[in-house]
Image (cartoon, rainbow, N blue to C red):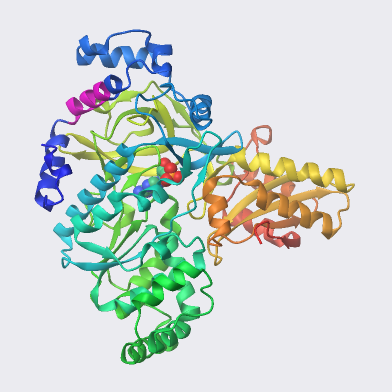
Amino acid sequence: ADSWMESAEAGHDDVIGWFEHVSEKACKVQSQTLRRILELNSGVEYLRKWLGTANVQEMDDYTLETLFTSLVPIVSHAELDPYIQRIADGETSPLLTQEPITVLSLSSGTTEGRQKYVPFTRHSSQTTLQIFRLSAAYRSRFYPIKEGGRILEFIYAGKEFKTLGGLTVGTATTHYYASKEFRTKQETTKSFTCSPQEVISGGDFAQSTYCHLLLGLHFSSQVEFVASAFSYTIVQAFSFFQEIWREICDDIKDGTLSSRITLPKTRKAVLALIRPNPSLASHIEEICTELESNLGWLGLIPKLWPNAKYISSIMTGSMLPYLTKLRHYAGGLPLVSADYGSTESWIGVNVDPHLPPEDVSFAVIPTFSYFEFIPLHRQQNHQDICSDGDFVEEKPVPLSQVRIGQEYELVLTTFTGLYRYRLGDVVEVTGFHKGTPKLSFIYRRKLILTINIDKNTEKDLQRVVDKASQLLSRTTKAEVVDFTSHADVTARPGHYIIYWEIRGDAEDKALEECCREMDAGFVDHGYVTSRRMKSIGPLELRVVERGTFGKVAERCVGKCGGLNQFKTPRCTTNSVMLKILDDSTVKRLRISAYD
Ligand code: AMP
């Protein structure tokens, strides 16, 4: 049944046939998956520590699952981090996997303020290829596209670096774009990205975006759909286009490339692809003039890419705020929500590409990892601005025992050496696809600040603010008495705002230093990359007048009672609270740590 994976020729039906088959007996497949993971990695240091010398090969499925879940603890990244660090430092004895790890991925979030690494293996690229093929197959059922067409894809590979032990580190997408699987995907799905590798891996968001747009227009008649990893990027790209479309038209007319593209390799690769095309340029100019003056850019995408059938990217979860703008650019084009996964493992595929993003759920792929589900129960009285949105937990259950309507936190056991690893995502089971659950993504637990691919928790924020407020106390006679934050997703580019109430006097110079310190202080890889590429703007520090947080507390307590239970929310999107804060703002500072 797995033969299609090896075959570049396998058609959409083979791929879907395989998935229907494994979903049908998902519970059994999950047991087999756990067995395979444990057999492949039997004897590694981490498993020996918990399982001793138990011989997994001789156990039946039930005994194996029971043994595994009763002996191996549920952990967070922090607990596996010492093992991953040893791998990063070059230790070669089998610690987490039997297969030697030579590549590490940067997952979102941090571990005690340090970047979070997870192992990356061939299995990681293979499952990426597999889910992309599966997803393309489901999409084509609803929205068939022409073979050999192009994708206007806003994708960006980051930089890679080496650890002390000589392992390569980068994001999972960076590894993927550099892998042979990325080329295989284009060949087997018979759809080709408009931009060459030199544009994808240019490393500067604005320059790469400019080239993606230019080449997208150059190949406009062949473009079958528009895509990106997360929809924030598409919205940013088209909002940038509104400003620079005339420049792009000039380049198309003359076959030139704007001087804003300074990266030599990128320039060379793009110039090799384009030719002067005055008639296309004047056609685009006509459409853009109309879009700009009469339509407020409504329907930009279908107007400029008349053969595009849909737009595909992750639109769920933290991407929901960008939907309105995306729909505006899309005109009537369908929005197809892309699949659900993480650096640690792919999780589920969107088997209903025709549903609007608000209603999408993901069918778990039972061969990719062994999944467990911690039932979560929301605490009462946690609404409005007082909500800290946390849950009461129950004992984890396997895939075979999940219930519709229940919320869970996902726990993964992967082929890449993570055992009973809390992913931190909260999902709800909305139904079943054959025998496998469909999950709707609720949110990342404890995540508070996110705009793009950046993900920061309350702990990360606390650490950053602590450092900056120590700096303030050292350099002035002032101190921070309370704070909160807000991710401004409506700005272009989006950015973080930190609100401070301070006691005592501080000169602007000192506050500027604090602001820079905080911009530099978020070390989550998604934030660092987005800041470097300028897809997230510099952090803003707003100083509010004395007593502001008192007003916030009053409002909060007025709504849900109990001053002794009140905690200042460390991040807010609540309009009442934001209004109080903004009305009380006395100073705004913005100093970039990334110039
Ligand atoms: P990373 O490991 O940095 O790639 O981030 C993975 C996280 O992104 C997941 O754990 C989710 O919180 C979020 N994510 C990934 N795919 C989706 C999706 N389709 N919808 C909503 N959130 C997603």
Q: Nearer the viewer, residue 454 or 571?
A: 454
Picture quadrant of ligand 1? top left
Q: Quadrant of the C terminus?
A: bottom right
* Residue at horizontal 18 percent and vertical 67 percent from the top: 148
In this rendering, the count of numbered labels is 0
> Residue 258: x percent and y percent?
49, 80
Instruction: Give the main secondary structure, helix, strand or loop, of the magenta stretch.
Output: helix
Q: Quadrant of the N terminus?
A: top left
* Residue at horizontal 63 percent and vertical 53 percent from the top: 577
- Looking at the image, residue 159 lies above or below residue 168: below
Q: Is residue 249 visible?
A: yes
Q: Is residue 573 visible?
A: no
Which quadrant of the view contains residue 47?
A: top left
Q: Nearer the viewer, residue 249 or 332?
A: 249
* Residue at horizontal 54 percent and vertical 67 percent from the top: 492
* Residue at horizontal 46 percent and vertical 67 percent from the top: 265
- Looking at the image, residue 239 lies above or below residue 471: below
Report whether 166 appears left or right of 421: right
Bounds of the magenta span? 26-36
Verify whether residue 331 appears in magenta: no
Which quadrant of the view contains residue 92?
A: top left
> Residue 403: x percent and y percent?
27, 31
Q: Nearer the viewer, residue 523 or 501?
A: 523
- Looking at the image, residue 158 lies above or below residue 277: above
> Residue 99: x percent and y percent?
34, 28
Report whether 351 appears left or right of 489: left
